[in-house]
């Protein structure tokens, strides 16, 4: 009766990694208990989560092929598009969120289009494989077009919510416009608005096979030292049309979640990322911590900080613990 913070499975979004093939269930070595799943296995996992009361999934794709224009991200028969159609056919009540980013689909592993910095060396049109001694940059506005195309293609496949995680400037406005033009004016946008350049994403990059082949993401993801800048990023995304916003990672940025909750009147989501999961798993496998209690304590803290939506690899485990 006196408890101030409540956690229910309805708070959870369960991230899944879809890969090619059939009957594939390949464990991610740095994330025990998390798998690369073929479409048929993804549907099974969706059903299992649904029966535990988890209302939503977020899908990441491992395409058959990567290239310099992220074809796998916006292809009508892309891996996430196929998984979405299959889930929607079999578990229609499940809310399916599409993570919109290009890093899993680009041969160089960056979240945007890459070109050599000007002055461009003669003949160096694209960046992969990188030419030694050349500097590269992410081309913000050329990326927006691919993100928009990806979003429309996901909406056509039946995705319920578009969640851009690339951190390009102006992408929420571009995606909103593209969705509206394609008659998806009712499809909401959950923007990864305050996404920090974090070492906690390490295991995800193994899971999604999206490690940048050169450089890092610090030119587009945020500096973890900056709360005010995070507020500005969130305000811009809301102005551009974001219906919900996200702070990511969660545990090292609980203060940013609380600040966002206090300042903005849209639903606030937080992502308990791969590194947070990996730390809890590693310590509990050594019997250094009580796994179940740490799971619940970590999720309760994220709720207490103010997030009503929590993306967590523990969605199923925590739903079971709450039951
Ligand atoms: C794609 C993306 C990343 C994560 C979610 N979307 C990786 C990154 O930015 O490098 C990380 C999620 C996690 O670590 O669990 N850009």
Image (tube, rainbow, N blue to C red):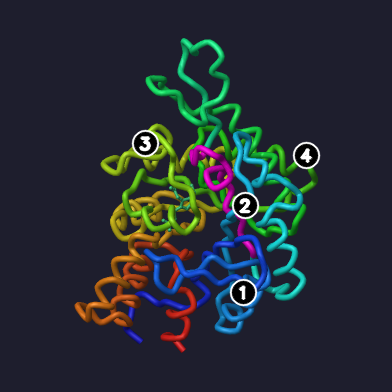
Left or right position of 321 against 129: left
Dot 4: element: helix
The residue identified by callout 2 is: 63
Q: Which residue appears at 75% of the width and 63% of the height?
A: 85
Q: Residue furthest right?
A: 183
Secondary structure mostly seen in the magenta stretch = loop
Which of the two marks, 3 or 4, is nearer to us in this view? 3
Left or right position of 63 against 261: right
Range of residues picked out in magenta: 96-111
The percent coordinates of residue 167 (x first, y second) are 48, 40
Magenta stretch: residue 100 in it?
yes
Dot 1: element: helix
2 or 4: tag closer to the N-terminus: 2
Would you identify the image quadrant in which residue 181 lies? top right
The residue identified by callout 3 is: 218
The residue identified by callout 4 is: 181
3 or 2: tag closer to the N-terminus: 2
| Mark 3 → mark 4, Cα distance in angstroms | 32 Å
Which of the two marks, 2 or 4, is nearer to us in this view? 2
Magenta stretch: residue 298 in it?
no
The residue identified by callout 1 is: 46
3 or 4: tag closer to the N-terminus: 4
| Mark 3 → mark 2, Cα distance in angstroms | 25 Å
2 or 1: tag closer to the N-terminus: 1
| Mark 1 → mark 4, Cα distance in angstroms | 31 Å
Dot 3: element: loop
- Quick check: 82 above or below 69? below
- Mark 2 residue's CB less than 8 Å from ligand 1: no
1 or 4: tag closer to the N-terminus: 1
């Amino acid at each position: 009766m006196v408890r101030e913070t409540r956690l229910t499975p309805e708070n959870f979004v369960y991230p899944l990694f879809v890969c090619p093939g059939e009957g594939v269930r390949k464990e991610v070595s740095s994330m025990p208990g998390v798998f690369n799943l073929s479409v048929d296995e993804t549907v099974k996992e969706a059903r299992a989560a649904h029966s535990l009361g988890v209302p939503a999934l977020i899908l990441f794709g491992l395409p058959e092929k990567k290239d310099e224009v992220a074809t796998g991200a916006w292809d009508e028969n892309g891996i996430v598009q196929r998984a979405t159609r299959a889930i929607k056919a079999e578990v229609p009540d499940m809310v399916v969120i599409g993570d919109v980013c290009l890093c899993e689909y680009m041969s160089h592993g960056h979240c945007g289009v890459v070109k050599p910095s000007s002055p461009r060396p003669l003949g160096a049109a694209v960046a992969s494989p990188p030419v030694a001694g050349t500097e590269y940059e992410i081309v913000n506005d050329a990326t927006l077009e691919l993100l928009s195309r990806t979003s429309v293609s996901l909406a056509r496949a039946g995705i319920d919510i578009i969640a851009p995680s690339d951190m390009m400037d102006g992408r929420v406005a571009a995606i909103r416009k593209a969705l509206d033009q394609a008659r998806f004016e009712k499809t909401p946008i959950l923007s990864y608005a305050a996404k920090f350049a974090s070492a906690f994403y390490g295991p995800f990059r193994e899971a999604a096979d999206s490690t940048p082949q050169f450089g890092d993401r610090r030119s587009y993801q945020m500096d973890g030292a900056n709360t005010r800048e995070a507020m500005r990023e969130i305000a811009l995304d809301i102005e551009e049309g974001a219906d919900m916003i996200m702070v990511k990672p969660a545990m090292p940025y609980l203060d940013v979640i609380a600040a966002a909750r206090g300042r903005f009147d849209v639903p606030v989501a937080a992502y308990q990322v791969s590194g947070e999961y990996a730390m809890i798993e590693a310590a509990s496998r050594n019997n250094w911590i009580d796994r179940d209690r740490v799971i619940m304590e970590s999720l309760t803290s994220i709720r207490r900080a103010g997030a009503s939506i929590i993306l967590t690899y523990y969605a199923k485990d925590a739903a079971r613990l709450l039951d």
